[in-house]
Amino acid sequence: MKILALILARGGSKRCPGKNIRQLGGKPLIAWSIDAAKVVSGICDILVSTDDQAIADVASDAGALVPWLRPAELSSDTATSVDAALHALDWYEGDRGVVDALLLLQPTSPFRTSETIKSGIQLFSEHTPDSVVGVSTSHNHPAWTFSIMNGRLVPFIDGNGLETRSQDLETAYVVNGALYLISTDVLRDQRTFFPKDTCPLMMHSRKEALDIDDEWDFKMAECMIGGETCA
């Protein structure tokens, strides 16, 4: 099986400026994902799609393929990951040959390991789903969440979950963003990373599941590396 690893890394993050090339543990954030993918057999290339020259330079130095800067129309706040992924996939197959699957690795998941990537590929190969997505247990159960209407709390979902002890609730899972592996045919046909036939890749490590979205998340990542107690 021939798999293309793709990292989508826009510049201009508002909640955590410059995060994709910000230093974490002595190397740029994006390099963590590149390094994790480098040692995984079956990955033919690690392609980085970015609209930022500084990110492109750092990713290239880390060993990724960065053949162009992403067009502006695919780098706006309204552009989707699917559109950017298909743009990258179309270029790669036109230039380097057909691949069987696309492995999307978010640069904001620095602690996702090579072994986890290998597990995702093994699950994809053995069970032949349309896609595999990394998930973790939810620490905020949907049965205990609310919306606010007219200044009052309203249960987000119907049922008696609020009267049920947390340990008695059915386990809920969330997509953690660390890994998406999908058939290229399915991605093109359905234009989603979540087709109906999607297998979960269970990730039990809270560290691996960390997705850096803002300054607090980055601080948590630095604490994890430094062995500090995060307040």
Image (tube, helix red, strand yellow):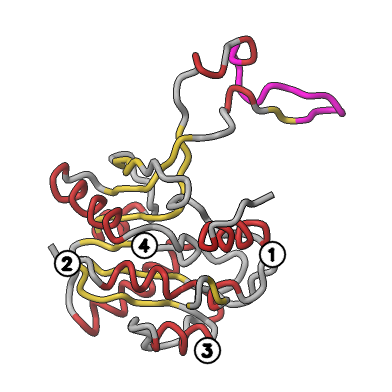
Which type of secondary structure does the marked residue at label 4 adopt? strand
Give the side of residue 215 with respect to residue 119, left or right.
right
Which type of secondary structure does the marked residue at label 3 adopt? helix
Label 3, label 4: how far apart the Cα atoms are: 21 Å
| Residues packed near mark 3 inside 10 Å, few (<14), some (14 to 19) or many (20 plus) | some
Label 4, label 2: how far apart the Cα atoms are: 16 Å
Q: Would you name the residue on which mark 1 appears?
A: 15
Label 2, label 1: how far apart the Cα atoms are: 35 Å
- Residues tagged 4 and 1 counted as in contact (Cβ below 8 A): no
Q: Which mark is residue 104?
A: 4
Label 3, label 2: how far apart the Cα atoms are: 29 Å
Q: Residue furthest right?
A: 151
Label 4, label 1: how far apart the Cα atoms are: 22 Å
**In this rendering, the label closer to the viewer, 3 or 2:** 2
Q: Is residue 2 above or below residue 229?
A: below
Residue at (12% x, 62% y) in the render: 1
- Residues tagged 2 and 1 counted as in contact (Cβ below 8 A): no
Location of residue 203 (image quadrant): top left
- Name the kind of residue labelled 3 in the image: Gln
Instruction: Tell me the magenta residue range.
Output: 148-161
**Residue 104 locus on image (x, y percent):** 36, 62
Q: Earlier in the sequence, mark 3 or mark 4?
A: 3
| Residues packed near mark 1 inside 10 Å, few (<14), some (14 to 19) or many (20 plus) | few
Q: Would you name the residue on which mark 2 appears?
A: 41
- Name the kind of residue labelled 4 in the image: Leu
Q: Earlier in the sequence, mark 4 or mark 2?
A: 2
Q: Earlier in the sequence, mark 4 or mark 1?
A: 1
- Name the kind of residue labelled 2 in the image: Ser
